[in-house]
Image (tube, grey):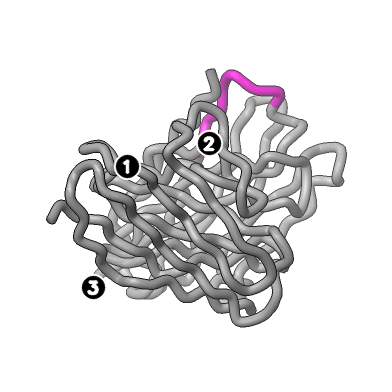
Amino acid sequence: EIVMTQSPATLSVSLGERATLSCRASQSVTSSLAWYQQKPGQAPRLLIYGASTRATGIPARFSGSGSRTEFTLTISSLQSEDFAVYFCQQYDNRPPTFGQGSRVEIK
Amino acid sequence: EVQLLESGGGLAHPGGSLRVSCAASGLTFASYGMSWVRQAPGKGLEWVSSVSGTGSGERTFYADSVKGRFIISRDTPKNTVSLQLNSLRAEDTAVYFCAKETESSGWYIFDYWGQGALVTVSP
């Protein structure tokens, strides 16, 4: 199965600052990469699919980029509601696999 | 509005069985694949199983970690998908999320999720 590795494990950011999260795949997943946000006690929420397409209702401050094995999620100006854990997931091959998550916390 | 509502789960002993179910509304249920994704306490997400849409033959798929122990099924007229958990192990302890896929089969983008059902396996 394809192993997804996220970095950093934790990112401390101030309100209004930019956050950049990375995700690496153990082999090419083309552009079959999604990003999810999860807050404590809640289900994950789809943010990005196809590496760069925002899901319905997702604010423009969230953007995704990359292809093959290297991907990035950028939050351009952090709002209070953005402090959460973010997971990447590949769906190029079955089984779909997730990264271990990156926590974005308030600095 | 799409809604997914899980039920079931609870406490089981090692070797025991449980069932979790998911009732879907607000969508043409037959048109979409449905998956179960679990999350152990304080851990990440793990895809467990999926069943494709009616047009894709309602094919079933499993993670290696649960193959031969778990059974996924869908009741399309009732808009429900269920996961029968057998031969439970301590490492199956997790919140089990029902998740809707964006396509009928094999395109594992999960655009809607249920609130989760807790399964605890303990002596």
The residue beneath circle 2 is B112
> Given contact means CB atoms under 8 Å apart, are the residues at marks 2 and 3 in contact?
no
> What is the spatial separation of the Cα atoms under label 2 and label 3, in whole angstroms?
34 Å
Left or right? Give the position of A9 relative to B32. left
**Residue type at tag 1:** Ser
Disc 2, SS? strand
Quadrant of the rendered structure where residue A15 is?
A: top left
Q: Which mark is residue B123?
A: 3
What label does residue B59 carry, if any?
none
Q: Amino acid at mark 2?
A: Tyr
Residues marked 3 and 1, same chain = no
Whether residue A80 is in magenta: the answer is no
Q: Furthest residue to the left? A: A107
Residue at 73 percent across and 56 percent down: it is: B60
Q: Do the residues at discs 2 and 3 belong to one chain?
A: yes
Mark 2 or 3: in front is 2
Three-letter code for the amino acid on which mark 3 is drawn: Pro
Secondary structure, mark 1, is loop
Label 1 resides on the chain identified as A
* Magenta range: B22-28
Front: mark 3 or 1: 1
User: Which residue is drawn at the image coordinates 41% and 46% (left, top)?
Assistant: A44
CA neighbours of label 1 inside 10 A, class few (<14), some (14 to 19), many (20+): some
Of badges 2 and 1, nearer the viewer stands 1
Which residue is identified by label 1?
Answer: A77
Tell me the quadrant of the picture where the C terminus of chain A can be found. Answer: bottom left
The residue that appears at 26% across and 48% down in the rendered structure is A17
Q: Foreground: B93 or A87? A: A87
Q: Position of residue B76 (x, y in %)?
A: 71, 31
Q: Position of residue B72 (x, y in %)?
A: 62, 53
Circle nearer the N terminus (2, 3): 2
